[in-house]
Amino acid sequence: MIKCPHCGADMPEEALFCESCGKERQLVPDYEAEVNQSMEETISTIAVELANTQEIVPQELARDAVIREQVYKEKEAAKAKAEEKEAASTDAGDVKEGESAPEKTADQKKEKKPAKKKGSSSVSSSNPPHNSTLTVIMLVASMTVVLLAAGMIAFFMNRSNTSTYDYQISQAKMYESQGDYEQMLDYARKAGEIASNSSDAKMLTARAYAGLGRKEEERIVLEGLVITDPAYTEAYDLLIPLYEESKEYEKIAQTLLTCPDQSVMAKYADYIAETPQFSMEPGQYTGSISVKLLATGSGTIYYTVDGSEPTTKSSVYTTPLILEEGKVKIRAVYQNSFGIVSEESVAEYDVVGNINTTAGTPEVLLEPATYTQPQVITCKAPSENYEIYYTSNGQDPGLDSREYDRPIPLPLGPSVFKFALFDQDGNPGEIITCHYQLNLDLPLSQDQAKNLLVQALVSAGVLADSHGSIANGEGRRSYQANSAFEVDGQVYYLLEEFFEDNEGGKNRTGNLYGVSVVTGQSFNVTESADGKFSLSGIG
């Protein structure tokens, strides 16, 4: 028997409710309160830590399990009482009426026990019912602790994974693909905090700023990136357009100077202003010499010969410099079409006399005559010790004239060419004069060919407009269709390109174009050293 915790009345150990007051008995015995309290504190502590990640096992689970166990035990106890009552009734029926039942011996009392039916259960006096209940509670609590512990492990593993550099990078890329640049920026910054030297994190940050239209912050990040990692080529493709937009062409040139990747340099070659080169090595020479100043691109070379520093206000180079006698220091700079000025080039020459010798005359292979098909003029020098210079304007050739380095397309209509040999000391030979006439009956005029070419270059983005203006640059380009050539039986106008600066200077760019005299289609033209022409598409 046990005491009711509410009214103090005696009640069977297996009873779930008190017969006196009707209230539910206490499931866990009082002497196990410390164990229960410790268990609840442990479970509560774990539950608080995992409140945001795991679902806590309901506390009613233990209660329900105990109630099911107790109901089962009450049914079994009721069966046992019924069996005892039936046994007692059977024993009483064996005593005859009027006789008293014989006194049982101690051994008989021991041996007389209720029969245990198969499938029935009994509660051992050495294992009180409350121990079984406590076992169920402990089992449920253990399962709860295991589940909560597994949840804790999953929580901390997930929290650990989401704090890694790779996770931040992947999240930034995911939000970029979704167009959510605010979230992208947040994760890119976190990646940068974890790995401060990560070029990928910096690039993602810059792209996030670009997506948000925050160009100044994008620019700051990219400028830092090309300094810390100049080989990170993707940075140039974002940074240079920002400079282009603000027309900071000098910054483009300065930025490209630190780039080790030749593909980037080639892509933005128009912004690079290389220093001018000299056709003759500095040093001492006998007799007059002709010095050419060379630069890549369609800009302008400025030079001085009085020792002063060259600027864009100095003399504009147009023809080779003839040095007769004495010491001369040539200083030159190159300004490209974007206004970017190169570093200075310097060459010193000492000319100590002039030897009067005759070099002879060059051999001109195209006979002076009238022609009705495109032709080229080919010349030969006696040896490699001579150079050929020529004119087509009626003047005598000198070292400041055009040098013959490949066959010359015969101009349309009448023309007069003068050729002369010059030795290594710059001394000229005799001048040879040739008169030519090229008559072609063409369906397309020279002006029409020029206009069609300009339209094709505008469509390809080479020119900004039909006036020959250059996109993002100063000056303009112009074209002359003075001759013709033939490829695979088809005749094309040959057009030379010139660059004209805002101050009136005009120089050949070296670019050649062809326009079909039948279809009007335009092409890039390449001329080989032996005077052969090849075509390729524009743009």
Image (cartoon, helix red, strand yellow):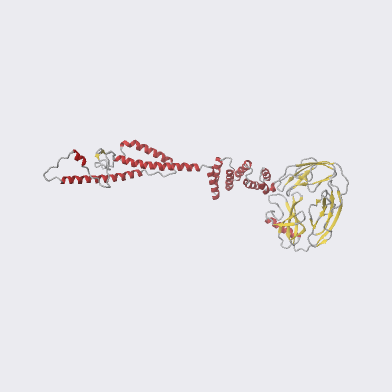
Considering only vertical position in the picture, is 8 above or below 403? above
Left or right: residue 192 versus residue 302 is: left
Q: Position of residue 22 (x, y in %)?
A: 26, 43
Quadrant showing the N terminus: top left
Q: Residue furthest left?
A: 98
Towards the viewer: 225 or 301: 225
In the figure, residue 258 lies in which quadrant?
A: top right
* Figure check: 123 above or below 514: above
Where is residue 167? Give x, y as percent. Answer: 52, 44
- Nearest the eye: 465 or 413: 413
Can residue 410 be seen in the rendering of this structure?
no
**Rendered location of residue 38, percent (x, y):** 37, 36
In percent of the image, x 18 and y 46: which residue is there?
90
User: Is residue 296 visible in this depiction of the protein?
Assistant: yes
Residue 99 image point, x, y percent: 11, 43
Q: Quadrant of the C terminus?
A: bottom right
Viewed as shown, does residue 87 lie left or right of 216? left
> Is 152 above or below relative to 410?
above
Q: Residue 372 falls in which quadrant of the image?
A: bottom right
Identified at 35% across, 43% down, the residue is 62
